[in-house]
Amino acid sequence: FQLSYLAVIGIVTIHPRIYKLIRFRNFLLDKIWTIIVVSIAAQIATFPLAMLYFHQFPNYFIFSNLIVIPLATAIIYMGLITLLFGFYVPLQAFVAMVLAWLVMALNESVFFIESFPHSITEHISISILEAWFMYLSIVLFIMFSEWRIVKHLRLAMLGVACLSLVYLWENYDHSNQKMIAVYDIKGKRAVSFVKGRDQVLVADTSLTRNADMVLFHMRHFWDDIGIAHTLSFDARIKPAQLPAQRVIHNNYPFIGFEGKTIMILDDDFVASKEGNLEVDFLIISGNNIRKRDQLFKQITPQLVIIDSSVKRYAAGYWKKQCELNAIPMYDVNSSGCYLAHF
């Protein structure tokens, strides 16, 4: 809804100002120029919102629209003609076949251009504040181009300067961030240990190998917090299999991170009879932890986190145990992703 109306507003307000910059007497060149200008106008009006929502920018939008706009126009007309010929089925069937070819051509042309190298700039992240500064600057630049009032240009440049300052502050903040994220992904276990722009992701391989799930559940969040490098490990990994690196210190099932001790309790864990262990975070995964009734006699956590791999019946059990032992508890299944900043 927002993108559609913004595109129309952009075409109505920006198109005439760009179109009049160049005049072509040749009919075909004029039509090509018109499509290019329409594409630029619509993109100017929508790109901040598109980057805010979808974290990407189509680099070849001008080339794709040279194909898409004529085909989309033809599809609209052919759709109407198909309805008009409803009184004569053989003719309607032929028109419908042409319509199907046009739709297929449209789809294939988009996929073809998408296959080009660097067709999309991905992993862009802007905040709502940055989007507002972008739109403020765009409006002021348009006002300056219309009325040539220097004040509008100065305000537009001030908007760009504010945008740059916000961007620099976010980069600084991302470079110094330290956090733990326990994700809410139904039936999966996934924990991120974030330090600056690096992170270690401890998750099920069925999740990390599924690009669509990673994109849907985690990728945009990583873009928002400026993650540049991700090191992924299987949630069931054992100490000898996990190489040393600078974000976390692993001693399965214990993980050291920024002075905190995190214990990941899964189906393979067997409670021992040795002493009482104190941990900052106890992350419970899976549903078949043996001797679980003895757990809080041997482990004293500051906070229990139930991840999304724990089924409802097991989560109910752990909630009761936490209440009986007066231990704070967070269930990502009911409360969403857990974030702890340090």
Image: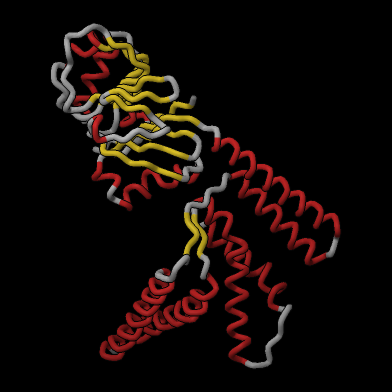
Residue at x 41% of width, y 25% of height:
257
Query: Can you tell which quarter of the image residue 247 is in?
Result: top left
Residue at x 61% of width, y 80% of height:
34
In screen coordinates, is 10 left or right of 222?
Answer: right
Q: Is 8 in front, or is 24?
A: 24
Picture coordinates of residue 273, whole percent (x, y): 17, 9
Query: Can you tell which quarter of the image residue 309 is in?
Result: top left
Q: Is 145 in front, or is 4?
A: 145
Picture coordinates of residue 270, whole percent (x, y): 16, 20
Picture coordinates of residue 151, whole percent (x, y): 85, 55
Colouring scheme applied when the structure was drawn: secondary structure
In screen coordinates, is 219 left or right of 15?
Answer: left
Residue at x 19% of width, y 26% of height:
313
Picture coordinates of residue 57, whole percent (x, y): 52, 60
Query: Can you tell which quarter of the image residue 240 is in?
Result: top left
Residue at x 79% of width, y 66% of height:
146
Q: Is 79 in front, or is 108?
A: 108
Residue 64 vertical position relative to residue 204 in the rendered view, above or below: below
